[in-house]
Amino acid sequence: MSKNIKSITNPKMSLNILTPAEVQKIHETTLQIIEHVGVRFPSRQALDIWAANGATIDWEKMIVKVKPHIIEAALKKAPPSYELGARDPNQNCAMDGNHVFLGTDGCGVEVIDIRTGQKRTSELKDVGEIARIADATEEIGFHWVALSAQDKPAQTRGLHELKAVWENSTKHVQTESVYNQVEARAAIEMAIAVAGSKEKLRHRPVLSLMQCTAPPLGHDGGSLEAALVAAEYGVPTGFMTMAANLTTGPATMAGNLAVGNAEVIAATAMLQLAFPGAPVFYAAAQTASDLRSGAYTGGGPEDFLYGAATNVLSDFYNIPLSMGSFATGAKEPNWQAGLENSISTLMACIVMSDMLLGAGFLHGSRIWSYSQMMLDCEIFSIIHKMMQGIVVNDETLAFDTIASVGPGGNFLTQKHTRKHMRDIFLPQFMDRRPYSEWEIKKDDARDWALEKASKILDNHQPDLLEPAISSELSKIIASVE
Amino acid sequence: MSTELFQKMAQSIIDGDSDLSVALANEAVAAGIDPLLAITEGFVLGVNQVGEAFSCGDAFLPELVMAGEAMKAAVQALEPEMEKRGSERQMLGKVVLATVEGDIHEIGKSLVGTMLASSGFQVFDLGVDVSTAKILAKVKEVGADIVALSALLTTTMVKQREVIDTLQESGLRPQVKVMVGGAPVTRDWVQKIGADGYSEDAIGAVTVAKSLMGISR
């Protein structure tokens, strides 16, 4: 169906969320945290890297304290731009600061079944089906593994998921579900099989890895080691902080930004010390915990502000950003979902975050909804349109046309109108029908979005992965099973 | 004199001031006040008041946690005296709490521990990345009524099942209730692994634990 990927580029809008002085202050506090408070790296391999590079290490607590100049010098080695490769090279995603790409969100545990409408535990089949639908849309630029293949053994689940996505889509795959060394090595082997060779993978990384930090100021040992494997092979790698006000971060937003920043840049610096020049990205989905329950919220004004502020930080370090937007806390595609996903995504886009994560989830990235996926695509399209801003020139000011219509006429029959009418956004899911027409079925966006997803699933045939590669992937998975 | 002290005790909990609650506990011991009385007439009243304010929406989670911590600190300060007098605090039940093996996520688990402790449960918090064998040993050692297991990853969640299966194999399962939690835990999962209860947040965990112990409120 679709071969083009819709990305936001050459924006006409901008936003001042933090002044350069404020960014500098956040940066300095971050360095102070890393130097005096330290960050936990519970991995012998990671600690050895730090030890070899002049950090102070508490080996028992596995806490690393690093002088600012070491961190700053290491971060300078990170490439400012690169491409996320796709099976179809026309669908590569440029991480160059001038493109915003939308991905599917992950990694959830339940799905609202597209056929029965019932909520159930996620399986491998769902991973492939979501990838197939995403492959057909122009809005989705790359994949995250959307759901956990809970019918597969825990130790190779992440690999089965990768295979399912590659078999159903030609777009780039980023996994957030591979977080130990053994699985990471196997995932890289699979990526080599898909790309063609080790060199081709380095040149066109069809895979990237995202690892979560363990806030406040910590990491998971397996995640660190998986990231190091990826960096070794030139597979783009990012660390995502989800430090949250009240629980894993201070109640104040600036402090929470500093905590998350310390986690991300310390780990990024470690990757650069081990493999200078390895492609890396900054990732964040910061939020405020709910005041009453302490729970993850998945939306709210704090999230929206983080969505814009984080890109200022990643720009400061000159590395691409993967920003958590969408991912509403709502339980169904409703007012809250529309509100949260629209504002969070606008804020992340207006500052040109390179990657947006992502489309399709309800209940704070736990329950997949095909309907929400399509609605999120439309939100992205609307913002894509808005980011083009208002073009002002003689053609768009249209003086001659205005003069020829004159007072009291209309513009419907003007050539100028015919030429430019398709500049106007045509929604798929907004209800603009007469009231009487709506009254017949009382259906709405959610129904149409679901219909669209079902139709794609029934009809879309992605370009198949060569059977020989598929069986190679199976062999690699079996070898670690 | 002790009425005034009891009021101060309650207030120290309401203010979430651990230093003050410990100082007041020590003051009570020095004055020869029965530590059990200090708890029931003093500190607990503060916990109850914060709890009520929380239910009405007037207090927030950090206040609840700080009250819990201040209460815990005060009780710890009173413990030597209780031991000396041979008196024991009536608890609602014994809970062995852990984040399962392979999983380092702590905050949700610890929050549940604080909530359970301040609600009157005796909590044995084993920390994070705890092996099934260690959990089982603790259950046996303390004669636990409840095992509470946290997991944040779908890949470590399977350890919750392993603990339940191992409890079954060792014949301990009938004596102990199992509650589970963590972002990926769903009702389906709870049924699949045969756990007795789950909650999506720490406040709910207290309700679940109480109902597992047959306590209505």
Image: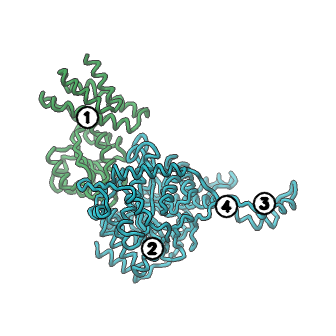
Chain colours: A cyan, B green
Say which residue label 2 marks.
Answer: A206
Q: Residue at x 30, y 66 (%)?
A: A155
Q: CA distance from mark 1 to mark 3?
A: 72 Å
Q: Residue at x 35, y 52 (%)?
A: A35
Of pointers 3 and 4, the one earlier in the residue sequence: 3
Badge 1 marks a residue whose secondary structure is helix
Q: CA distance from mark 2 to mark 1?
A: 54 Å
Say which residue label 1 marks.
Answer: B73
- Say if A286 sits above or below A356 in the image: above
Q: CA distance from mark 1 to mark 4?
A: 62 Å
Q: Chain of mark 4?
A: A
Q: Nearer the viewer, mark 4 or mark 2?
A: 2
Q: Are marks 2 and 3 on the same chain?
A: yes
Instruction: Give the image location of residue B175, x and y in percent.
Output: 18, 46
In this rendering, would B77 be left or right of A137?
left
Q: Chain of mark 3?
A: A
Q: Residue at x 25, y 28 (%)?
A: B23
Q: Nearer the viewer, mark 1 or mark 4?
A: 1
| Identity, as a three-letter code, of the amino acid under mark 4 | Phe
| Identity, as a three-letter code, of the amino acid under mark 2 | Val
Of pointers 4 and 2, the one earlier in the residue sequence: 2
The circle drawn on residue A425 is: 4
The circle drawn on residue A349 is: none
Q: Nearer the viewer, mark 3 or mark 4?
A: 3
* Tags 1 and 3 touching, CB below 8 Å: no
- Say if A195 sits above or below B167 in the image: below
Badge 2 marks a residue whose secondary structure is loop
Say which residue label 3 marks.
Answer: A397
Q: Residue at x 40, y 70 (%)?
A: A162
